[in-house]
């Protein structure tokens, strides 16, 4: 069974309801139909009801108990959404009138359904920008009580029969935290290791990446990664982690043995933590576009309840994969 097949099968084992905030988009509708047909999750499509129904009909789908439409302009839930949003944000100067307006925003409406327990998680970003998608999640769902920050990761699915023998890895943070401090980097690493275990059902081995391996170069950015590694080990001695490591030392066993002999992670890492957003974003796109990896994400971690972002260039299959991820995150939150 492939990595994605396993992920989908584990997601389908739970009865999750996922709300999609861009329900009129053809890719979203196609993904919703596929998710329901495969029992991956039940779906709520948010947006203009007539446009969504027309797109459903065009793609051979119909509304059902497992595939519902909620139009913020006409939904019976809108009044509750507006009232809850007002109570949530009145300390920020939001008035009842402003809350009523915000309740018409599909991103806000979808996130509020999650907050109010009407859905287990939400996915957006096929049309909206990352900043708007993440802002709605932070404002409405907020950080988990035990989370120091919200960060992101990508699941990188390697091509079949990759020479390394690997099937999937996690890259983080490639989409959200621009220049993390050493403490923030350690937190991102711990979050990503836990996400790897939850989503891929395997033991994480964390590499704190740099352009230096074990002091081969001297620079303040290298020092940051080295300090982050020490902090991670102190906070999470249960995790296999090491740093600072260059990517080749982290990924390739022969290079790891040469550059970092005795390391329990070098050459075997499956959770790659990049020192900043420049490195992470460039790295995952190189792996995707040149290396042929499938990139699932950005997946958000550290929120009280699941909310995830999509690339505006996503395909319907990308959306299906993210629905599965969100469903698994929701189940993990229940444990």
Image (cartoon, rainbow, N blue to C red):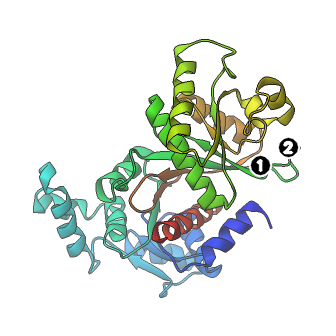
Residue at 44 percent of width and 64 percent of height: 122
Q: Report helix, strand or loop for mark 2.
A: loop
State the image coordinates of residue 186 (x, y, percent, origin top left). 50, 37
**Left or right of residue 244: residue 146:** left
Residue 62 or residue 221, whichever sits in front: 221
Q: Quadrant of the N terminus?
A: bottom right
Q: Is residue 311 visible?
A: no
Mark 2 or mark 1, which is nearer the start of the sequence? 1
**Left or right of residue 76: residue 308:** right
Residue sticking out furthest to the bottom:
65
> Where 276 falls versus 327 (above or below)?
above
Residue 332 or residue 64, whichever sits in front: 332
Residue 79 tag number: none
Q: Is residue 212 visible?
A: yes
State the image coordinates of residue 235 (x, y, percent, origin top left). 49, 42
**Marks 1 and 2 in Cβ contact (< 8 Å):** yes
State the image coordinates of residue 70 (x, y, percent, origin top left). 37, 76
* Residue labelled with disc 1: 158
Which of pointers 1 and 2 indicates the residue nearer the eye? 2
Residue at 51 percent of width and 76 percent of height: 16
* Residue labelled with disc 2: 164
Q: Quadrant of residue 171?
A: top right
State the image coordinates of residue 21 (x, y, percent, origin top left). 42, 64
Q: Report helix, strand or loop for mark 1.
A: loop
């Amino acid at each position: 069974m492939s990595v994605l097949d396993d992920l989908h099968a584990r997601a389908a084992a739970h009865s999750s309801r996922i709300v999609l905030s861009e329900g009129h988009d053809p890719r979203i509708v196609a993904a919703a139909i596929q998710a329901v047909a495969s029992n991956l999750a039940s779906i709520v499509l948010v947006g203009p009801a007539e446009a969504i129904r027309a797109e459903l009909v065009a793609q051979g789908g119909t509304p059902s108990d497992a595939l519902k439409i909620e139009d913020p302009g006409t939904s019976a839930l809108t009044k509750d959404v507006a009232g809850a949003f007002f109570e949530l944000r009145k300390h920020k100067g939001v008035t009842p009138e402003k809350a009523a307006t915000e309740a018409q925003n599909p991103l806000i409406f979808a996130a509020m359904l999650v907050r109010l327990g009407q859905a287990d998680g939400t996915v957006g970003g096929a049309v909206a920008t990352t900043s708007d998608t993440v802002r709605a999640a932070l404002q409405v769902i907020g950080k988990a009580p035990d989370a120091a920050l919200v960060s992101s990761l990508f699941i990188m699915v390697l091509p079949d029969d990759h020479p390394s023998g690997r099937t999937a890895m996690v890259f983080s943070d490639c989409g959200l935290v621009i220049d993390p401090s050493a403490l923030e980097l350690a937190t991102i690493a711990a979050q990503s290791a836990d996400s790897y275990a939850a989503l891929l059902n395997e033991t994480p081995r964390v590499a704190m990446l740099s352009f230096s391996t074990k002091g081969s170069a001297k620079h303040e950015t290298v020092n940051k990664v080295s300090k982050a590694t020490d902090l991670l080990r102190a906070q999470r001695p249960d995790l296999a982690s090491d740093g600072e490591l260059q990517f080749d030392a982290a990924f390739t066993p022969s290079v790891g043995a040469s550059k970092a002999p005795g390391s329990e992670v070098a050459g075997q890492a499956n959770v790659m933590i990049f020192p900043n957003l420049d490195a992470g974003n460039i790295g995952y796109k190189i792996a995707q576009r040149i290396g042929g990896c499938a990139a699932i994400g950005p997946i958000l971690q550290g929120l009280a309840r699941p909310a995830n972002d999509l690339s505006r260039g996503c395909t319907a299959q990308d959306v299906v994969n993210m629905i599965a991820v969100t469903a698994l995150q929701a189940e993990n939150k229940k444990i």
